[in-house]
Each structure stands twice: as structure tokens, then as C-alpha cells.
Image (cartoon, helix red, strand yellow):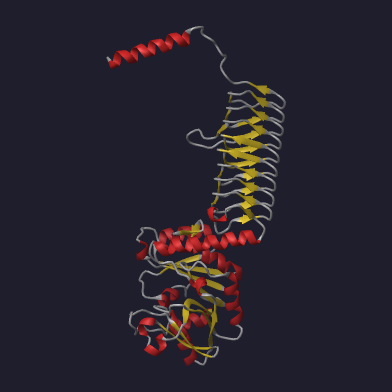
Amino acid sequence: MALVILAAGQGTRMNSDRPKPLHTLGGVPLIAHALAAGAALEPSRIVVVTGHGAEAVEAAVADLAPFANCVRQTEQLGTGHAVLQAAEALEGFEGDALVLYADTPFIRAETLTTMQAARAAHDIVVLGFEAADPGRYGRLILQGDRLERIVEAKDATPGELAVTTCNSGLLAADAATMMRLLRAVGNDNASGEYYLTDLPALAQAEGLSATAILCPEAETLGINSRAELAAAEAAFQAMKRAEMIETGVAMQAPETVFFALDTWVGRDAEIEPNVVFGPEVTVESGARIRAFSHLEGCHVSAGAVIGPYARLRPGAKIGNDARIGNFVEVKSAEIGEGAKVNHLSYIGDAEIGEGTNVGAGTVTCNYDGVMKHRTIVGRGAFIGSDTMLVAPVTVGDRAMTASGSVITEDVPEGALALGRAKQVNKPGLAVRLMERLRAIKAGRKG
């Protein structure tokens, strides 16, 4: 199977400088949804057809699917013309090609699998749906299970417009056959474009067979405007919340929790209100994510408690039964099993050992203005409140730092490190200083 994903459209109704395939839904670009659904077919080739904002789209595809091949449609001459741009990339490919759209994010992997299975009996398989309001959709003209042709709404007769079985745009066929038929497509139609939808009729003329597989209309929802994107986000979140609840995740106020496409949460995990998940988050069974926390690019192990008001950034790995408390930020750091970072701390580019306690206000000073450096704290250590750990630095197992210390050198195992100035008390100086300041202030007012 090869995937051909159309991502060349300008999306003028989005009123945006950003290419439409890169607008986000569920924390990821729209095109990521098409790639994720198509991945269920284990494609051996992926071809993405770009156009408007091609460089930005191609950069995103390189991150999402590094083995995908991007080709450009320099002129917007219709869907048939767009798919034909993939011909060179599919040269010599022996297998099926499936056409997907970067702006149609709700197509399920199961639907694509059904289309793939239908190819065993038909040369061309089109995905259709029963439309509540057929409107501008292309109509599928069927005789039994045989698809005779697809008629675009602007080219349809009154009788054809009465048909409610409509075209989603998705189409599967043998790759070589698809490209051969596309070369025969003309543009003698109301739009003057080369339609992918002409393929079933061309196939019929050659004695090939075509059919349609139907899915729910909601699955074919396309995104063409900001309003549609907002509605799609609401629909996506509703589906994701229902999926989480069904798999055993506890949520007190699910309508306040927001997920990304790839969020994975284990059974019996608890998510409190007003939690936001960015991309690439895994939460294991029995963990608890407390209110107003934000997670992205992180892994939370079983039994861990995060928040409230915590932020886990990419590269954060929280061990079993660890505690990350209120107003704590963790980035590119491993927090060991049973370790605690409970209050007002920043832990970045670090390793915190098993059972270690990190006091309130602790900061790993990981950035020197040019490069990042790493902090390592061993097992069972105690980091006093308001400690500044100036990386690169290592604190050994069972070592301690005194509150308010600035640690610039390694601390041996079992040692106590003090890195602060000696306290000096000046009798009566506070009163005299305040009297002087008040006199200065009064003089300025006079």
C-alpha cells in the first residue's frame, strides 16, 4: 500500500498565512491525523503532494514521517492533477495507492482497512457517506454495489442532485492503474479542473469495476475555515474524552480536560479538572494528574502524582510513585522512583535519584547563556530549600545541601554542602535605615 496525501491547497477561508495542513487539531498539525490513520495500513510508501506553503509543509512532514516523499503541485488544477504529481514517486511501485486529504482529520483507520479489503473484489474503491445536506458534495451514482460514476454538484443534473450518497474524496486503486487513468482525465467541466472523481467512469469504460464503501458523515468532515476548525477541535476532544473514560481513566470534569492526538493514559489513572496534554505524553496506570497542570513530551510512571499547577516539558520522565508538586517545572530530566519535588522548583537537564527530596525553591541552573549543562543528584539525597545547583554538578547519594546554598562544586556521597555567606547582624541598623529612607521620601514630597 502507498499513501498519496493531498496537502497543496491554499485554504483561503482560513484567513491565515499558515498553510492549512499545519493548523493544529488535537495538539498536532492537521496532516498528522491523515498520517496517523494511514499508518494502520503499514504503507511501504507515502507521497505528500504540497503546493501553498510547500516548504513549511514539507518541513513538518519530515518531522512527522521522515520516510515520506514530498512532491509539489505548482499549479492548482484540481484533485486529479494533484494526485498525478505523485506518478514519478510511485514509478515501479507494485501495489495499491490510497488517496487521503490533509484537511480531513476524522477518517478512522478501520475505515481505511475496509477500503483496502474491498480492493480484493473491485478495481477502484471510493469512500462515500449518506449526507444530511448533500449541497455542494459530489454524488455517487450507484447501481447496486457498482459505482457507475461520480458527478460534481456543479455539473450534476436535477435528478443527480437528488442523490444523497456523496463522495468523501478518498479513493483506492492499483497504483499503476490509477496513474494511467489519471492521464486520460480531461478538464471539460464547470470548473475547468482535472477531477480525481472521473476515475470510476473511465474504469467502467475499460471494463474495470468500481464500488463505494460508506462511512458515517461525521468521519468525512473537512476543515475549510477557522469556525470549522474550532468545531472540529470540540468534536475531537469529545471523542478523546469518551475514549479515555471507556478505557478506565477517572476524570471529575472531563469537559475541562484537553488531549492531544497521541495522548496515552493508563487504566485507573486520575485526571483532575483543567489539565492540558500536549503531544507525546504517556501516563501509566494509577498515576494522578492534579488540577491546572500542563504536560507535553513527557512520561509519567505508575503511582506518580503531578501538580496541581505543575508543568512537565519535553524529556521529563517521572518515576514510579514520584511527586511533582505545585508550581514545579520539569524539563529534560529524570525523576527517580519515590523522589519528591513538591514546591516552586525548576528541574531542567537533570537526574534526580530514587527517594531524593528536593526542597522548595530549588533551581538547577542548567544554562550558561550558550550551552546547557546537566545536574545529577544521587539516591536518598536531601536538597535544602532555595538551593541553586549550578550545572554541571553532581550531588552524591545520601548527601545534603543547606537551605539557601549555591552549589558550584560536586558534593561527595553522604556529605553536607553549605554554599552561602555567613550571617552578620547589625544592632539597630534596620530602624536607623528606615528612618533615613522615610525622611528622604518626605523631603521629596515637600
Residue lying farthest to the left in this orientation: 446
Q: Is residue 341 above or below residue 216?
A: above
Left or right: where 408 falls relative to 51: right
Q: Is residue 227 above or below residue 145?
A: above
Q: Is residue 75 above or below residue 117?
A: above
Query: Measured from the top left, where is residue 263 in percent x and y?
Result: 59, 56
**Quadrant of residue 400 in the image?**
top right
Q: Is residue 214 above or below residue 307?
A: below
Q: Nearer the viewer, residue 112 or 91?
A: 112
**Quadrant of residue 336 in the image?**
top right
Residue drawn at x 47%, y 11% as measured from the top left: 430
Residue drawn at x 67%, y 55% as measured from the top left: 266
Query: Measured from the top left, where is residue 205 in percent x and y?
Result: 47, 92
Quadrant of the rendering where the N terminus is positioned? bottom right
Q: Nearer the viewer, residue 175 or 77?
A: 77
Q: Nearer the viewer, residue 108 or 124?
A: 108
Query: Measured from the top left, where is residue 278 in percent x and y?
Result: 54, 52
Residue drawn at x 69%, y 46% as measured from the top left: 303
Q: Is residue 169 visible?
A: yes
Quadrant of the rendering where the C terminus is positioned? top left
Q: Nearer the viewer, residue 174 or 132?
A: 132
Left or right: where 413 falls relative to 1: right
